[in-house]
């Protein structure tokens, strides 16, 4: 027995089995990868166009299982008219000639429903590069196709609306140069070649007073208003016409005017032209809407379903596909702010009771928990018998306007609060000064100085919305009226932020110290010096010092006036601390300590 030969044959068989297992593993992996592409129908045919494999995506999209389709002709999932015209065979022929082919067409499912798909067909070759069949990949693109058709229909509708309208609708850039004119506008303006006038300054078309009125209307529109006037302008053929004109701004993404919309109507003929103007204006408002429009709706009262466009649906958190098909009113109102529902229901009842139009403002919750303010306006359509059959309208996002109103109200309340506090402080200054001043002239002078210091501090706070102030600004502002030169008073300390109350208190204290120094202390002589300094520890401990030197001998006070009480009792309370006035031999010294929240300097 030849042992070596037997051993060699065994190894060959083992290698063959291993290769077979690897091939099976690769095929299984390949199949797993193909089946994982569930959004794609991946199909293979043999040379005769009979199905040889059919992935899970094909079953999901087309409806047939692989067992049902294996060995069946691929033409089964082509629509009958394409199958009769030989489209499947033509695709295979294209693939043979070019190596692959791509197309988009309608196909048919097992239940005979149709879907639009993008497809690609490629040649299949074996290991020896022999042509053994075809690979077909399909993807359902029905939604995209329908969306595109809807957009084209909307665009065509808008074009037809603009073409049918006798209004001259123009778009201008912010410099009022003409960039667009509607087809109907070119007709009534007798324009034969729009390219000949595009880019021309729009006000130059108007004569006499109309030119000034046009410029004024443009300014109104740029400021966010509606510019209106009537003026005279010739058509391009020289025919004089009187036009009723409206100019509005077209906002950009940032809400600021990006372009200008001008709508003109010929009102030079008869009263009928005025009637047509009103009707045309209503059609224009419905067709074009406000620049802030978020969407439109139509409530079919016979089916009790609200149909809405995609933008309207998303703002109300309704599935756009469901909104397009029609959804109950409750699907839209379920995200309303509960506080706004009663007013909405009252307005709706008013409409059905006979009101001519509907207008309601309300909030709608968004996915992130925020709210959007919306203004909805619409009209109710009745049949010949007076029965309501349709309620249509549009919604506009007014969130920015509402926020501005809220901020204005908050500011008004804050100003009122600050004013109340300021008046209370003024009252305290006046009453305490009158009580402690020896004479009325002295009181008047003291009151004037203290109110002046208070006014300076208020000016500083006004620059920061009355909330806080930087200590350097407060100190320099209080010293400025009393400071003869930069040498006599030295100021040092880190940058930090004071509250409004702390800023006002420190300003008044500095005024008292300056007044005393000018009359009796270091600032009453050229040799006198004042050092103003402060420190702030990392933990927020605040210390403020006023130190005088080089002035007349210090005489301790014999009585306590309002200024002393202010510095020793009132101001320290603003810093949650305490203070002391020292009558030292070198000069008066004022020390204040308390707490301040540390601020990056």
Image (spheres, helix red, strand yellow):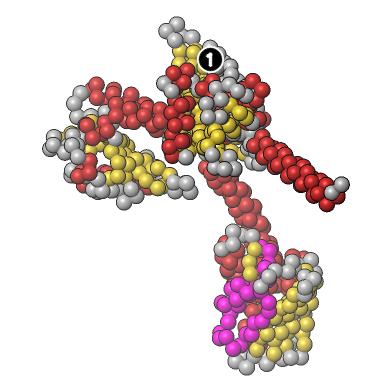
Residue drawn 55% across and 17% down?
112
Name the foreground residue: 216 vs 561: 216
**Residue 3: image x %, image y %?**
86, 50
Name the foreground residue: 446 vs 264: 264
Q: Give the labeled residue for mark 1.
A: 301
Q: Is residue 29 visible?
A: no
In which quadrant of the rendered view does residue 545 lie? bottom right
In which quadrant of the rendered view does residue 468 lie? bottom right
Residue farthest to the left, as pictured: 238
* Quadrant holding the C terminus: bottom right
Horizontal side of 133 relative to 91 (left or right) equals right
Q: Is residue 529 above or below residue 255?
A: below
**Residue 376: image x %, image y %?**
51, 30
In which quadrant of the rendered view does residue 419 lie? bottom right
**Residue 447: image x %, image y %?**
61, 68
Number of residue marks: 1
Q: Which residues are magenta?
A: 471-500
| Category of crowding for the residue at label 1, using alpha-carbon neighbours closer than 10 angstroms: few (below 14), some (14–19), many (at least 20) | some
Q: Is residue 551 visible?
A: yes
Residue drawn 19% across and 44% down?
196
Magenta stretch: includes residue 34: no
Magenta stretch: includes residue 473: yes
Q: Is residue 260 above or below residue 329?
A: below
Horizontal side of 149 relative to 372 (left or right) equals left
**Residue 186: image x %, image y %?**
23, 35
- Callout 1 secondary element: loop
């Amino acid at each position: 027995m030849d042992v070596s030969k037997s051993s060699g044959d065994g190894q060959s068989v083992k290698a063959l089995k291993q290769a077979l297992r690897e091939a099976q593993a690769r095929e299984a992996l390949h199949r797993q990868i193909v089946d994982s592409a569930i959004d794609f129908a991946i199909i293979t045919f043999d040379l005769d166009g009979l199905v040889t494999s059919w992935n899970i995506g094909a079953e999901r999209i087309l409806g047939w299982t692989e067992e049902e389709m294996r060995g069946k002709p691929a033409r089964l999932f082509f629509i009958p008219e394409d199958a009769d015209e030989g489209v499947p065979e033509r695709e295979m022929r294209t693939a043979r000639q070019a190596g692959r082919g791509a197309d988009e067409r309608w196909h048919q499912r097992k239940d005979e429903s149709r879907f639009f798909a993008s497809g690609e067909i490629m040649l299949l070759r074996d290991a020896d590069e022999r042509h053994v069949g075809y690979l077909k990949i399909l993807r359902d693109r029905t939604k995209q196709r329908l969306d595109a058709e809807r957009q084209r229909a909307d665009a065509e509708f808008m074009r037809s609306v603009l073409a049918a309208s006798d209004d001259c609708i123009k778009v201008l850039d912010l410099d009022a140069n003409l960039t667009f004119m509607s087809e109907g506008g070119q007709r009534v303006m007798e324009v034969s070649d729009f390219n000949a006038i595009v880019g021309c300054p729009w006000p130059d078309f108007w004569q006499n007073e109309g030119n000034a009125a046009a410029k004024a209307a443009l300014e109104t529109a740029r400021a966010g208003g509606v510019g209106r006037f009537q003026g005279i302008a010739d058509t391009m053929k020289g025919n004089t016409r009187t036009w009723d004109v409206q100019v509005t701004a077209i906002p950009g993404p940032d809400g600021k005017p990006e372009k200008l919309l001008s709508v003109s109507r010929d009102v030079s003929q008869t009263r009928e032209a005025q009637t047509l103007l009103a009707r045309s204006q209503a059609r224009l408002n419905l067709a074009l809407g406000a620049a802030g429009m978020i969407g439109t709706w139509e409530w079919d009262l016979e089916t009790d379903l609200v149909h809405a466009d995609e933008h309207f649906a998303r703002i109300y958190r309704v599935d756009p596909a469901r909104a397009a098909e029609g959804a109950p009113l409750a699907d839209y109102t379920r995200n309303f702010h509960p506080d706004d529902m009663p007013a909405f229901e009252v307005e709706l009842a008013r409409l059905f009771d006979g009101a001519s139009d509907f207008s309601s403002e309300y909030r709608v919750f968004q996915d992130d928990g925020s709210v959007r303010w919306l203004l909805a306006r619409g009209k109710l359509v009745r049949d010949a018998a007076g029965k309501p059959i349709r309620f249509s309208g549009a919604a506009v996002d007014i969130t920015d306007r509402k926020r501005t109103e809220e901020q204005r109200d908050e500011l008004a309340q804050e100003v009122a609060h600050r004013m109340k506090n300021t008046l209370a402080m003024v009252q305290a200054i006046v009453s305490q000064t009158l009580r402690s001043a020896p004479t009325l002239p002295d009181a008047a002078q003291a009151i004037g100085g203290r109110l002046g210091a208070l006014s300076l501090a208020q000016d500083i706070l006004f620059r920061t919305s009355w909330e806080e102030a930087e200590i350097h600004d407060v100190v320099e502002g209080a010293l400025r009226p009393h400071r003869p030169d930069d040498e006599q008073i030295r100021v040092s300390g880190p940058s930090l932020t004071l509250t409004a109350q702390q800023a006002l208190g420190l300003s008044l204290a500095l005024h008292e110290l300056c007044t005393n120094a000018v009359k009796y202390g270091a600032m009453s002589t050229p040799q006198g010096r004042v050092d103003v300094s402060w420190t702030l520890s990392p933990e927020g401990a605040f210390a403020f010092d006023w130190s005088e030197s080089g002035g007349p001998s210090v005489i301790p006070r014999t009585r306590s006036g309002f200024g002393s009480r202010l510095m020793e009792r009132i101001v320290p309370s603003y810093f949650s601390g305490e203070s002391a006035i020292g009558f030292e031999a070198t000069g008066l010294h004022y020390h204040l300590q308390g707490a301040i929240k540390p601020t990056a300097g």
